[in-house]
């Protein structure tokens, strides 16, 4: 192994063995030690600094101190799986996350992306593909761009502005353009309260008593649709005299 590493003078740094941190950092999270080792070497040879974690809890602990630029996250891990680890990561940072898993069906991949992951790599992986996908995600992360999708994993809500599709707890929610517009405004400002005036101007282009009545009716329709999927749902809250807010945390 030493001869292999010596052949690459520009090799990245193993952050588990060094505090040097001058290049982009990749955290690899997997309960399989051999997989962590392999991915770390692949990424080091590609010029990245790397660090590993064998569990979700270890990853969360390292996340606060090392601040990686991207996380490669396995899904099937004991104690805290990749889904739960992802939720916890999102509580403290927007660092890009790439799921890397043996769950390789198209359904699994779609579920991972809908869950909010920036990409999904199926095992067994092709070494150059891992490097290419990490680089692509990092490029996107550093490009200023408007958000096109809002994902709130704690309540199971995904709003795609490009396709104008809303999924709630893995169920597609059909809605009119105006209903979608109201929901999108709430999502863009979540978890903050959105004033009646802001919603009116964003959706209707004007603010009046009549417009606010229309908004109130659309909120009623949205709540009814979400309630049909989950009769305990309370996604849109009315904050008296202030406006509405999207409930993004579990009650």
Image: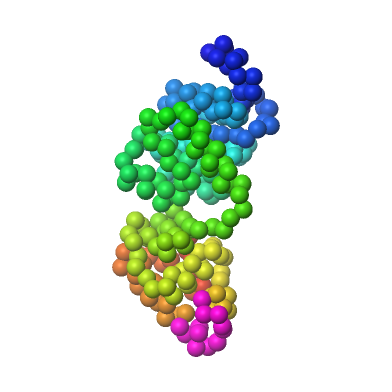
For the question of whether residue 56 can be seen, the reply is no
Q: Residue at x 48, y 46 (%)?
A: 118
Say which quarter of the image contains residue 75: top left
Q: Which quadrant does the C terminus fall into?
A: bottom left
- Please say whether residue 95 is one of the residues in the magenta stretch: no
For the question of whether residue 180 can be seen, the reply is yes
Asked if 227 appears above or below 23 in the picture, the reply is below
- Please say whether residue 204 is one of the residues in the magenta stretch: yes
Q: Residue at x 68, y 32 (%)?
A: 22
Q: Residue at x 64, y 19 (%)?
A: 9
Please provide percent x and percent y for residue 170. 34, 56
Please provide percent x and percent y for residue 225. 34, 70
Highlighted magenta segment, given as a residue range: 203-214
Please provide percent x and percent y for residue 161. 47, 62
20 relative to 208 in the view: left or right: right
Q: How many marks?
A: 0
Say which quarter of the image contains residue 155: bottom left
Q: Residue at x 47, y 85 (%)?
A: 213
Say which quarter of the image contains residue 175: bottom left
Asked if 140 appears above or below 62 in the picture, the reply is below
Applied colour scheme: rainbow
Single out the residue that lies furthest toward the top: 3
Magenta stretch secondary structure, dominant = helix
Asked if 200 appears above or below 49 in the picture, the reply is below
Please provide percent x and percent y for residue 176. 39, 73
């Amino acid at each position: 192994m030493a001869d292999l590493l010596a052949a690459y003078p520009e090799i990245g740094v193993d952050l588990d063995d060094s505090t040097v941190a001058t290049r982009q950092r990749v955290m690899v999270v997997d309960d399989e030690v051999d997989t962590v080792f392999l991915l770390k070497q692949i990424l080091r040879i590609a010029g990245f600094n790397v660090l590993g974690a064998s569990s979700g809890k270890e990853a969360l602990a390292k996340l606060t101190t090392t601040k990686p630029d991207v996380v490669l996250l396995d899904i099937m891990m004991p104690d805290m799986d990749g889904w739960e680890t992802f939720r916890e990561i999102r509580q403290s940072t927007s660092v890009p996350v790439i799921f890397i898993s043996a769950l390789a069906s198209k359904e699994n991949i779609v579920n991972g992306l809908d869950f909010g992951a920036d990409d999904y790599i199926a095992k067994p992986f092709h070494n150059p593909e891992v490097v290419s996908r990490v680089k692509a995600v990092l490029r996107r992360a550093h490009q200023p761009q408007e958000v096109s999708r809002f994902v709130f994993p704690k309540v199971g809500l995904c709003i795609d502005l490009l396709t104008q599709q809303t999924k709630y707890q893995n169920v597609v929610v059909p809605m009119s353009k105006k209903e979608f517009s109201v929901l999108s405004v709430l999502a863009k400002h979540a978890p903050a309260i959105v004033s009646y005036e802001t919603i009116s101007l964003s959706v209707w282009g004007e603010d009046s008593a009549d417009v606010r009545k229309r908004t109130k009716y659309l909120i009623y329709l949205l709540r009814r649709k979400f309630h049909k999927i989950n009769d305990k749902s309370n996604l849109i809250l009315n904050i008296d005299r202030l406006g509405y807010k999207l409930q993004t945390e579990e009650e």
